[in-house]
Image: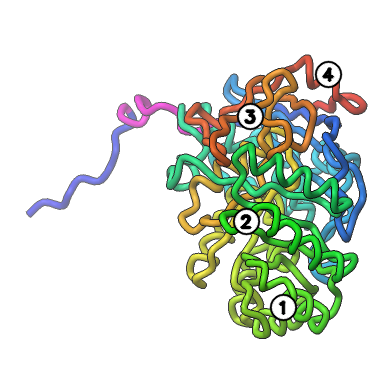
Amino acid sequence: MPPLETSVSDETVSRRPSATLLIERVEVLVVSLPQRRPHPTATRARRLGEYVIVKVFAGGLVGLGEATVLKEWGGDFGRYYGEHPATTAKLITEVFAPALLGKDAMQFERLLDEMNLAAKGYPYAKASLDIAVHDVVGKALGVPVYQLLGGRYRQEVPIAHSLGILSTDALLEEVAIAVSEGVRTIKLKVGLDSDRDVEVVRRVRELVGDGITISVDANRAWGTPKNAIRTIRRMEPYGLAFAEQPVEGLHDMAVVTRSVDTDIMADETAWSPEDVLDIARADAANLISIYTTKPGGLHRALKVAAVADAAGFLYNVNGSHETGVGNAANLHLACALRNCKLACVLPVSAPEDHRQTAIAGRSYLDDIITEPFEYRSGSLFVSDRPGLGVELDEEKVRKYLQGSVAVVA
C-alpha cells in the first residue's frame, strides 16, 4: 500500500489567505472622567477615573484597550503593586508597545511573552495591550471578544453596586435608589471601624429586606484574624453573603476562612493562576475575585479562571470603575467564564446624554464611548458586535484627555 500523501503543493499554499495581523502602530493616551461621587476605601481616597487608553492599529483596524491603574492598591506584602497613569503610559510607550510592533496580533500568548521579556511586572500596562489586541483580532475575524475566550456562556451579568466608606445617611440613600433601579447585590466597602461596619450592614439589611444580596470588602484592613472573625460573626445575623479580603496573606486568610460560616473571597491575594493554586492548597478562601488587569489581560485571566475551576471555586469578575473600554473587556470575560456565578462589580457605562440609571452602577457623569451598555433589571448584556463592541467618541476623548497622545510606530 503506497504511503499517504501528506505534502501540500506550493500552489495550494499560495491560495491560502494570510492568517497574520501585524501590529503597525500603537497610540497611548490618558483620560480623566468626572466622578459621580468619591469612592473612599480603607486603603485609598484617590479620585477614580484617570486611566490609560491604548489603540492598537493592525490590518487597517483599530483595537482598544485600557489600563485601569490604581497606584494605592496592590497584592499581599508588596508582592504586586499599583501603577500610576503617567508611569504606565510611559512604560507602554517606551517598553511594551515597541516590543509588539511588527508582531502578529493573533498570537496572544507570544505577545505576552514578548512583553514579559521586555520588562517584568506591570500587569496593568500589559493588560491594556492584551485587551486591545483581542479587540482588533475580534474585529478582523468578525466575532465578539467572548468568542476568543471560549464562547459566550451567558448573555447577561448581574452587577453588584459598590459603595465606598460613606456617611451612613448618604450610603442608605444611595442603596435605596440603586435597588429601585434594579440592582440585586450591594457591596459595602469596610475596614476602618468594625463597629461602624457592623452597624452599616445591619442598617442596609433593614432597608432592603431579605431579597437583596449583601457583601463586604475590607481590602485587608481588619488587620488581624481575630478582629476579622469577631466582625464577620457580628455581621452574620444580617445575612452576609461573603466577606472579601478581610486580612492580608495566605495564613491569616486561612485562619479566618476556617473560623466563620460566611464565605471568604480572595482578591488582593489572588492575581495569578499560581496564586489561586496556593489559595486552594492553603484553604485560604472559598471564592475568588478575577480581574482582567491583575493577571495582565484577558488571555491570562482565562488561566486564572481555569485553575479556579479545577479547584472548585466560584468567582466573579471584579472591576475598578473602568471607562466603557475596560468595562467591555470585563463584561466579555464574565460572559465567557462558566463559574462566574456571582454578581460582578461592573459600571453601567454610558455617555452623559444616554445614561440609563441615576445611581445604579454609575461611577462617572460621562464616558468616552459612543453608546451606552445595555442594562436591564440589574444586569448588563454583552454586545455581539465584533471585538469589544465599543467605539470611542473622539470629541469626548479630546475633552477628557490629560496631556498629549503618544504614538509608537
- Residue 338 in percent (x, y) is at 46, 55
Q: Earlier in the sequence, mark 4 or mark 3?
A: 3
Give the number of the mark in front: 1 or 2: 2
> What count of labels does the image hold?
4
Which amino acid does the dot numbered 4 rest on? Arg
**Range covered by the magenta-colored residues:** 11-21
Left of 136 or right of it: where is 36? right
- The crowd level at tag 4 (other Cα within 10 Å; few <14, some 14-19, many 20+) is some
- How far apart marks 3 and 2 lie (CA) works out to 44 Å
Which amino acid does the dot numbered 1 rest on? Arg
- How far apart marks 1 and 2 lie (CA) works out to 20 Å
Q: Is residue 16 magenta?
A: yes
Left of 94 or right of it: where is 109? left
- The crowd level at tag 3 (other Cα within 10 Å; few <14, some 14-19, many 20+) is many
Q: Which mark is residue 63?
A: 3
Query: Dot 1 corresponds to which residue?
Result: 233
Q: Nearer the viewer, residue 264 or 151?
A: 264
At horizontal 60% and vertical 30% (from top left) the residue drawn is 373
Which amino acid does the dot numbered 3 rest on? Gly
Query: Dot 2 corresponds to which residue?
Result: 209
Q: Which mark is residue 398?
A: 4
Q: Is residue 357 above or below residue 399?
A: below
Give the number of the mark in front: 3 or 1: 1
Give the number of the mark in front: 4 or 3: 4
- How far apart marks 4 and 1 lie (CA) works out to 50 Å
Q: Nearer the viewer, residue 101 or 30?
A: 30
